[in-house]
Image: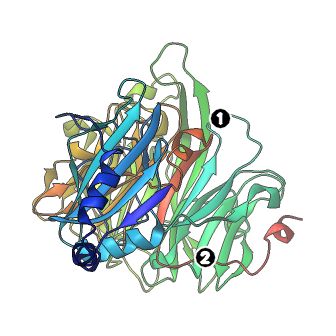
Amino acid sequence: MKTRQYSKHFITNILSTGCLILLINACTTSLPKETSTEYPDIFPDYKDVIVPCNIAPVNFMIENAHKISADFYLEHEKLFTVDGDHVIEIPQKTWMESLERAKGKQLKVVVSVWNDQHQEGIKYRDFRITVSNDSITPWIAYRLIPPGYVLWKTMGIYQRHLEDFEENCIVSNNENHEGCINCHSFHNYSPQRFLFHARGKNGCSVMVKNGKAERLELDKMAPYFKGTYPYWHPKGRFVVLANCDTHQAFYGQSNNKVEVYDLESDLMVYDSQEHKIITDPRFTEKQYWETFPAFSPDGKSLYFCQARARNIPKEYAQLKYAILRTDFNETNGTLGNKVDTIYNPRTDGGSASFPRISPDGRFLLFTESESGTFPIWHKQADLKMIDLKTNRYVDTAPVNSKDVDSYHSWDENGKWIIFSSRRLDGRYTRLFIAHFDPKIGFSKPVLLPQKNPEHNTERLYSYNIPEFVNGEIILEESVAHLFE
């Protein structure tokens, strides 16, 4: 891989020494002989995307290329050139310097390829990469898990620095007897305070404060209450969770392979100050099932999904979840009397999961599928969004695909979302980033950049529950002792 950078001083020196003719002659032999009006077939597809001004290099590849060259321009100035065999790997320092210069502007990329069909090279139509003035929250946390149905061997919760390619494991299931690790949730994007759930031998929820982990045994505070899908109140005293009895079954004939469903689910609030569980009889009765709670950014409202109980699995197609909203009392953790319906399956037609409110409190982003509560295996699952100010839907077509588009999170400034999708191969969930502007809408999604683009297809793990974090997560010691 070779990189050539250019500057006005470089051109001036060439002219002053009278070597411009020699430079042109030296470069002519490597110039492509053909030109094309078509765009290059690059993977990942970074053509005409919007990227954060602090994102890692958007390295890409072209299959079956013998040689590939990419020129990067800012307006009419060539910034640098990267050469490779079939991969363009942009140096970190060069890329970050270019992003800084290109804020609010567009980089033009010209790709040339040499392969069996074009042995003397072909230059493709240039494309643009818009560099947003908006930075993105610099870290994400996610679970890496093999895409199995019942059994697994290895999984863990990992973190990734979005400004480069640093990735490391926060906690692995090697530390809890190879049990399941899931449901990681952070207080106000903080790496210092979060919790996750560990199932299996001596399983429990785990609370982490300033790098130190401790057991949070919810079931000892309220019998049979284990707690999943946690969401922190903005002020940090309360955590709202769902208490679910979850099962799964396989389809005999369906485009969907597996179905995960609850046989009951209720809401519960954990008071971290008093170390107790708070429940509301309206949301623990057997007639209705509640799940996927989420606070509004100001902490005054609680959103959650609710469905009328059904005879499962016989009536699974009729199991459809609404999104409800009620007031939250931040002094004692109780829920308000009034309950509003924000998404109604009777009129909207589908089933809602994962309500997430934008940091400014205006937009409700959620996943919609045809039925049920677990859309990760539903090919019809799409992201939908409601403007809570106007009660109208926002166009989310730019971020959806023909395959599963599911779990999503807002960055702390509300300018970017990250979500999981199976659009690449229908098997593995990968992470995509998209910019959001209330006046323009969503941009074309960007596949999470990798140092080696082939990593996107060679890694045989699914990315699960991506959450933004505003700093590196550091655990002072292994959590294995918590499960002895």
Q: Quadrant of the C terminus?
A: bottom right
Q: Could you tell which of marks 1 and 2 lies nearer the N-terminus? A: 1
Q: Where in the figure is residue 215, as x and y percent of width and height? A: 74, 72
What is the x, y in percent for residue 371? 38, 33
Is residue 341 toward the left or the right of residue 270 in the image?
left
Task: Name the amino acid type tagged 1.
Answer: Gly
Q: Tell me if I can see residue 275 in this picture.
A: yes
9 versus 91 height, above or below:
below
Q: Position of residue 290 (x, y in %)?
A: 45, 51
Between 447 and 85, the residue placed more toward the observer is 85
**What kind of element bears circle 1?**
loop
What residue sits right under mark 2 in the picture? 473
Within the image, what quadrant is residue 74 found in?
Answer: bottom left
Query: In the picture, residue 182 is in which quadrant?
Result: bottom right
* Residue picked out by circle 1: 148
Amino acid residing under circle 2: Ile
Q: Is residue 78 left or right of residue 152?
A: left
Give me the residue at 39% from left, 49% from top: 306
Q: Nearer the viewer, residue 228 or 429?
A: 429
Q: Which SS class for mark 2?
A: loop
Q: Nearer the viewer, residue 480 or 425?
A: 425
Q: How is the image coloured?
A: rainbow
Answer with the quarter of the image where residue 165 lies.
Answer: bottom right
Give the residue drawn at x 32%, y 49%: 46
Q: Is residue 316 above or below residue 93?
A: above
